[in-house]
Amino acid sequence: MPEGPAPAPVTQRLRVRYAKRGRLRFTSHRDISRAVERAIRRAGIPVAFSAGFTPHPKISYAGAAATGVASEAEYLEIGLITPCDPDHVRTGLDDALPEGLDILDAVEACTGALADRLEASRWLVRLDGVVPDVAEAAALAFMAAGEIEVERLTKKGRRRFDARAAVIACELDRRATKEAGASCAILRMVVRHMTPAVRPDDVLAGLRQVADLAPPSPPLVTRLAQGPLGESAGELTDPLTPDRQTAPAGDGVAATASAIGTADPGAVSAQP
């Protein structure tokens, strides 16, 4: 057993929504986690650490998007040893992160497991060089199919699975396509989180299968939202709403703005 005092206990957990934009969509999840850890040190956020010979900051990630995919709805949870104002943590962490990793929201974790609320994702997929009417016909053919088996290479080898079962909605976004002002088609998809996970590239493989839709260049994929499914088909709700609704009014957290954002002089740069 390692010697020394036990690590300070977690007194508060914060749930954070962040975006992955621009060139940073090509950053691996490991590099993003390293950037977040460095930013936490630079911002002076009192993060809790695990016990053992190699303590790690208590940060967990839920439903992270794949490398190469942009996102407006990534989530992480931070364990703190001192209660802090979520807004101060949000601004301090955002200031310490590189441009393209942007902190959008932070709330105190008050109820349930965050991962359990992430039931589906809404995606925007831009297909350059594709005629909108052709993309719309392909989306209609996809949604009309009962089952569409696709194949993906996994760590355990090639695996076949039904890509259609997870897709709640797939349609041409005519307004976004028109606003793009270029030769492209923009699809919106709502995909349920299942095992195995069905990703936008799996849906595109299904579109190629049922309608021979093959974009001449790689698609630009952006996750717009993820969260619980609403009552209407394809509607997603904010996964942080239950925490906001149960948070005590005027909870009087101990940390102040000066306690967050006090940079550690020896901290490493936040650039990944």
Image: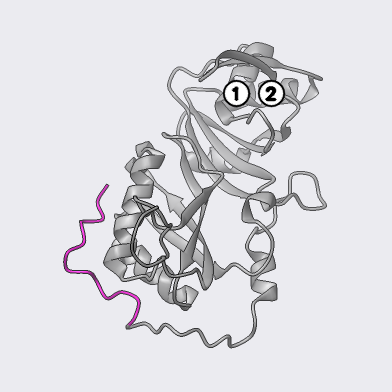
Q: Which mark is residue 163?
A: 2
Q: Does residue 197 appear to the left or right of 18 in the view shown? A: right
- For badge 2, the amino acid type reads Ala
Q: What residue is shown at x 68% (from left), y 18% (from top)?
A: 161
- Total count of labels: 2
The question of residue 266 being in magenta is answered with: yes
Q: Disc 1 versus disc 2: distance between alpha carbons?
A: 6 Å
Highlighted magenta segment, given as a residue range:
259-272
Q: Examine the rendered structure and indicate whether residue 140 appears above or below residue 221.
A: above
Judged left or right of residue 136, residue 64 is left
For the point 48% across and 78% down, the residue is 83
Mark 1 touching mark 2, by CB under 8 A?
A: yes
Residue at far left of view: 265
Residue 269 place in picture, x, y as percent: 21, 56
Which residue: 65% across, 82% down?
248
For mark 1, give the secondary structure: helix
According to the picture, the residue beneath numbered tag 1 turns out to be 202
Residue 89, image x and y in percent? 42, 71
156, 216: nearer the viewer = 156
Position in image of residue 129 (x %, y %) = 47, 23
State the image coordinates of residue 98 (x, y, percent, origin top left): 29, 55
User: Is residue 110 magenta-colored?
Assistant: no
Residue 176, compared with residue 39, is above or below; it is above
Quadrant assignment, res 192: top right
User: Secondary structure of the magenta portion, mostly?
Assistant: loop
Answer left or right for 49 relative to 176: left
How many other residues sit within 10 Å of disc 1, few (<14), some (14-19) or many (≥20)? many
